[in-house]
């Protein structure tokens, strides 16, 4: 029985890692959709979100069953509860990729991102990928030390977003209302994607060490 | 022991209801801050968020202890797990009120909302209050039937947001980039506040009936 139990805990972890892979693919394709006005990429992200949602549901169901059947305590209980939180964060990351893809779809065949902002948005996309890849690695390796780095990695994303907003507010900004809205929201969605990756890492720290990371300030 | 147990479950519910009260107060004051450029109201929302965060932490700690100590099954386990989810949603609702308050603070002494949009934003504020009050009621009454109404109530919020965006995209929109950004984000924050209230209600349905509400589509 105990073996099955630890196999089930292991399966939770594998599902989470699979979610990080899917979320990474989603944000990469969403960035392509946005920058290249690539409608196929946008549709792929939008329809692919179902797979992320299904994994979230599966994790929710199996944590519930695990708790009811095995009544884990201490570290095992932490593992189950944090897995539930991490799945929720990864599911939201998928949603943010979808939001970005929908901006791209709405503006197709034009690109929602004016030429002079392309490099910043590209960098935000890369930073988002880096964060979710690293989140997957720390979950895989149960590596609390590396997990603690994600908060600082995410500062880079926040800086990029501020840079983006500064460009919009610059007197030289000549684009219309629609571009202003799209860039404002896209910036917000990348930032939130990064925040959720940091939450995954915070939860991993708690899982491994039992030490809570205060993420309330960061959330706002 | 069992009595203490059910008292603890009851205490969870009371904390959640207290969170709905605080989230309601926060969004009401945030709307005042936004519409009247009321800096005191904005500060109150920003500093008051700590109280909501603390309740979220308390619920997290006590659900963990409850699970470790009492090892609930079936409906009690659902109560504990859904309480955790609901606390997370209510905590995010507090954050969205803070986001709105920060827009107001940034634009003070001016109002971030142009005069012709005040009535729509006021209505969004009222709708947000209505949703969180109703969420508190269904949690208090364990009323799954009324809880199912929140999704439709939230349609009103989505319509208001579309109306807001339509006004911004109208050729008659004469306001600057900053107003466009602020109104775009404020609209998003009210919409998300409403979404989280619906999640609270969805979780209540699951708690009472054991029947899952698929909220993935709604989230996006």
Image: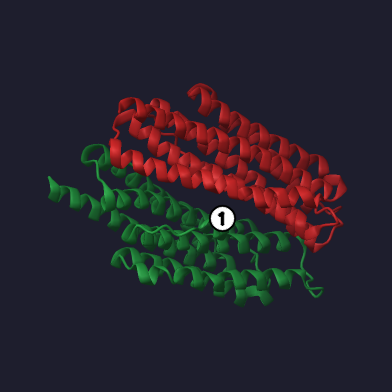
Chain colours: A green, B red
Q: Which of A148 and B146 is in front in this view?
A: A148
Q: Position of residue A55 (x, y in %)?
A: 35, 50
Vertical side of B60 occupied by B99: above or below:
below
At mark 1, the secondary structure is: helix
Q: In this view, does A134 lie to the left or right of B168?
A: left
Residue at (64% x, 59% y) in the render: A185
Where residue B21 sits in the image (x, y, percent)?
A: 62, 35
Of residues A55 and A178, the one drawn nearer to the viewer in this rendering: A55
On the question of residue B219 being in view, the answer is no
Query: For mark 1, what is the residue?
Result: A99
Q: Can residue B167 be seen in this view?
A: yes
Q: Mark 1 lies on which chain?
A: A
Q: Position of residue B72 (x, y in %)?
A: 30, 34
Quarter holding the N terminus of chain A?
A: top left
Left or right side of A109 for B66: left
A202 relative to A110 in the view: left or right: left
Q: How many numbered tags mark residues here?
A: 1
Percent of width and height locating residue A171 = 82, 73
Residue positioned 77% across, 39% down in the render: B122
Mark 1 burial class by Cα count in 10 Å: few <14, some 14-19, many 20+? many
Q: Quadrant of residue A130?
A: bottom left
Quadrant the C terminus of chain A occupies: bottom right
Point 65% across, 40% down: residue: B158
Give above or below for A171 relative to A203.
below
């Amino acid at each position: 029985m105990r073996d099955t139990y630890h196999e089930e805990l292991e399966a939770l972890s594998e599902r989470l890692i699979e979610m990080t892979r899917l979320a990474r693919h989603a944000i990469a394709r969403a960035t392509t959709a946005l920058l290249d006005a690539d409608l196929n990429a946008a549709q792929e992200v939008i329809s692919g979100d179902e797979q992320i949602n299904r994994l979230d549901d599966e994790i929710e169901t199996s944590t519930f069953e695990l708790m009811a059947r095995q009544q884990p305590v201490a570290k095992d209980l932490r593992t189950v509860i944090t897995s539930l939180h991490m799945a929720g964060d990864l599911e939201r990351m998928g949603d943010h990729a979808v939001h970005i893809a929908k901006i791209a779809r709405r503006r197709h065949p034009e690109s929602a991102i004016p030429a002079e902002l392309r490099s910043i948005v590209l960098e935000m996309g890369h930073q988002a990928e880096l964060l979710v890849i690293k989140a997957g690695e720390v979950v895989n390796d149960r590596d609390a030390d590396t997990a603690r780095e994600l908060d600082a990695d995410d500062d880079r994303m926040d800086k990029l977003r501020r840079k983006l907003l500064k460009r919009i507010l610059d007197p030289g900004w000549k684009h219309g209302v629609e571009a202003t809205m799209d860039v404002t929201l896209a910036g917000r969605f990348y930032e939130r994607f990064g925040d959720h990756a940091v939450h995954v890492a915070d939860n991993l720290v708690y899982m491994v060490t039992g030490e809570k990371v205060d993420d309330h300030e960061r959330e706002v």
